[in-house]
Image (spheres, rainbow, N blue to C red):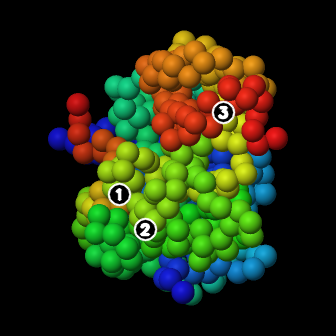
Amino acid sequence: MTVVETAPFPRYMVCNADEMEQGTFKDRVLIHTDPHQIIEGMIIVGYSVLAEKGIIFIRSSYENAARILEREIVRAKEAGFLGNNILGSGFSMEIAVHRSAGRYICGENTAQINAIEGRRANPRQPPPYSTEKGIWGLPTVTHNVETLACVPHILRNGPEWFKSLANTPTGAGTKLYCVSGRVNRPGCFELPMGTRLSEIIEDHAGGLPEGCEYKACLPGGASTRFLPKEFYHIEMDFDTMKQAGHRLGTGSIIVFDHKTCLVGATLNMLEFFARESCGWCTPCREGLPYIRDILALIEAGEGREEFIPLLRRVSKYLWNSYCALAPGAASPVESLLTYFEDEVQEHISQRRCPFK
Amino acid sequence: MTTQVLFQNRQPNRIATLEEYRKSGGYEALTMRLGSTQGPKCSRSLLMLYFLAAGAQVFRLEESG
C-alpha cells in the first residue's frame, strides 16, 4: 500500500516561492514572465496525488508577484482549469496565495508548514515526513517554482525530450541560471542544464568589466562553496558539481573579481545568516554570530593567528544543527579557508583589509 | 540561441497572458491527464520519472513507513 492510496484527505500541494537565497531571483522572473506554467504544474501534481488544496507560499516582499498569481488563478478558474470538477474530470482543486512571514527560514520545508499553520517558523524533525503528516497533520507535497513550471512541458513532450535538452548525460532539461555580482549583464538566463560556468559568464552575462579578472563565484546562492579559478570551465549541473565537491544549489551565480575582498563578502553573508537563524538549535543560534564576529575582527584588522583554526572548528559544529540553514552558512566560510586562506592570512599579518 | 522552454513566452516588460500560454500549448498537458482513463496513478509514474531524471529531491510519495 502507498501513502497516495491510503493517506487521509484533504491533501495539500505547496509551491515554495519563498525565494530569499542571496543572488537568487529566478522564481520572481518566472512569475513575472509566464505564471500559468506554475499554476498548471501545481494542478497536474495536485491531481497525481489527489491534493485538492494548493498553496503558493510566496516571499512577503514579492507583493507584485503575489498579486499577479492571485489574478491569474482567478483567470485559470474562469477558464475551467481550477475549482470544482476541473474539465469534467471529477477532480477539484483550489489554489491560495500565502504571503511568507518574511524570514529566510520560512523557505525550509518543515518550517514552512509551521508558518502556514500560523506558528513560529521553526523547522520540524522528520519522521514523520510532510508527505505523511504535513499541514495540519495531513499529507503535503512541496515543490519549488522552477520544478513545477517544468511539469507541463515534460508531460506534453515526454521525459526523453526533456533529458535531451541538457548538455550532460546525467542532467535533464534547461536550468534558470541567475547571474549577479561583477559582470556586465546580470540577469536570469535559461540555458541547457550543464552549461559551462565560463560560457554562462562570458557569453550570456557579458563577461567581467574591463580590468577585472575572475577570482571566484558562489555557484548556487550564498549557501554554496566558493568556486575558484580552477573550476571556471566546470559544467553546471547537479552531478558534475557534486563530483567536484560542490553544490549547484539554486544555480544562482554571484561573481567576484580579483579586487573584491572575500573575507568581507563572507562576512556580509554571515551577517545575513546570523540574523535569519530561527534560534531553535544551539549550533546555529550561537555558532553563526560567533563566526560573524570573528570575521568582522579579521576584516577590521584585529584578527589573530589562532582565529583561522578556530573558524575551522566552529564551522564544523554548524553541521550538527537541526536544519540546513547552518550547514549552508558554513559552506562559504569553509571554502574561504580552503581556497583563500592566504587572503585571510594577509588580513591578519597586515592588520588591515588589503583590498581597502 | 538555445531552446527556451520556461521562457518561450517571455516578453519585454509584460506578463504572458492566459491566451498566449494556451497558444503555446499551455494546459494541453492538464487536459490530456485529466481526460486520461488511466487516472492519477499514471501521472504519478510520469512525475516520478521526471523528478528522478531532473535530479530533484523526491519526497516519499510511494512509501508508507
Mark nearer the viewer, 1 or 2: 1
Name the subunit of mark 1.
A
Say what amino acid the circle numbered 1 marks.
Thr
Cα–Cα gap, marks 3 and 2: 38 Å
Q: Residues within 10 Å of mark 1 (few under 14, many from 20)?
A: some
Q: Residues within 10 Å of mark 3 (few under 14, many from 20)?
A: some
Residue A301 % position (x, y):
76, 25
Which element carries disc 2, helix, strand or loop?
A: loop
Instruction: Looking at this view, name the residue that lies furthest to the right.
Output: A356
- Depth order, front residue of A273/A116: A273
Residue located beneath label 2 in the image: A193
Q: Is residue B10 visible?
A: yes
Percent x, y of residue A51 = 43, 49
Locate residue A338 relative to residue B44 in the image: left or right: right
Question: Which residue is under mark 1?
Answer: A240
Q: Earlier in the sequence, mark 3 or mark 2?
A: 2
Are discs 1 and 2 located on one and the same chain? yes
Q: Which residue is mark 3?
A: A346
